[in-house]
Amino acid sequence: MDKTEILTERIKLRLIDVLDLESIHNLHSLPETDAYNALGIPENIEETKSIIEPWILENQLNEIKNYTFAIDNKSNGTFMGLFGLKLGNKKYKRAEVWYKIHSDYWNKGYATESLKAILNFGFETLKLHRIEAGCAVDNTASFKVLEKAGMIREGRLRQVLPLKSGWSDNFEYSILETDERKKK
C-alpha cells in the first residue's frame, strides 16, 4: 500500500482508509458542503461506505491513478475534509483535482494550503505537466481558492453540473508546470 503523506505548516494530507468512514459520512451529509457538489447527500452510512470503498481500494494499488486524501489538522489530527487527484492518460501528464472541506474549516486558508500542497506533489513528485479543476460558477469561495493557488480560468462549460438547485455552469481552471505558482 502506498504510504503517501503530504505535510504543510498546518495540515497533513494522507490517503483515506476505512477508519475515515464516519468522518467522511459526516462531511458528505452537510447541506452546506453539498450545495455545489453533484454527489448528493447519502441516505445512510452504508451509502457513504459504498462510495468510498473504491477510493480506498484505489489508494492501495501499486500504481495509483486516483488519489483520495484526508485533510487532517497537523496539530491535533482532526479530519477537516477530502482532497482528490485524478490522473489522466500517462501520455498527457495531466490530472484533475477536487476537494470538499468541512464547513467548520471554511475561510481559514485550509483549502488553499491543501491545493498548493497537491499542486507541488503533482508537479514535483508525479512530474505532471498540467493540473485542472472545475467549480460551479456560483461557488465563489472555491474559485477564489483555485485562483489563490495560481490556477487560471480557461473557460465556462454550460449547464454540466446537476446540482440540487438545478443545472449549473462550471468554470474550468488549469495550471501548467511552467506557470507561476505559490509553493507554500
Image (tube, helix red, strand yellow):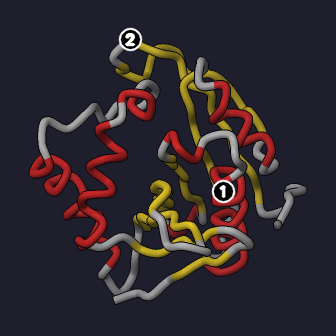
Residue name at image x 35 percent, y 87 percent: 62
Question: What secondary structure is marked by label 1?
Answer: helix
Viewed as shown, does residue 92 lie left or right of 150? left
Viewed as shown, does residue 157 lie left or right of 24? right
User: What residue occupies the far top of the structure in this picture?
Assistant: 166
**Is residue 146 visible in this depiction of the protein?**
yes
Q: Quadrant of the N terminus?
A: bottom left
Front residue (pair 181, 104): 104
Question: What secondary structure is marked by label 2?
Answer: loop
Q: Quadrant of the C terminus?
A: bottom right
Viewed as shown, does residue 130 lie left or right of 52? right
Residue name at image x 66 percent, y 56 percent: 115
Which sits earlier in the primary sequence, circle 1 or circle 2?
A: 1
Up/down of 54 relative to 27, above or below = below
Q: Which mark is residue 115?
A: 1
Mark 1 surroundings: few (<14), some (14-19) or many (≥20) residues within 10 A: many
Query: Where residue 105 sits: x, y (%)?
Result: 58, 47
Query: Where residue 34 sits: x, y (%)?
Result: 38, 31
Residue name at image x 70 percent, y 73 percent: 8
Q: Which mark is residue 165?
A: 2
Q: Which mark is residue 46?
A: none
Front residue (pair 14, 102): 102
Residue name at image x 40 percent, y 87 percent: 2
**Is residue 88 visible in this depiction of the protein?**
no
Which corner quadrant of the image does residue 177 belong to?
bottom right
Query: Where residue 84 sits: x, y (%)?
Result: 47, 58
Three-letter code, disc 1: Leu
Q: Are marks 1 and 2 in contact (CB under 8 Å)?
A: no
Three-letter code, disc 2: Ser
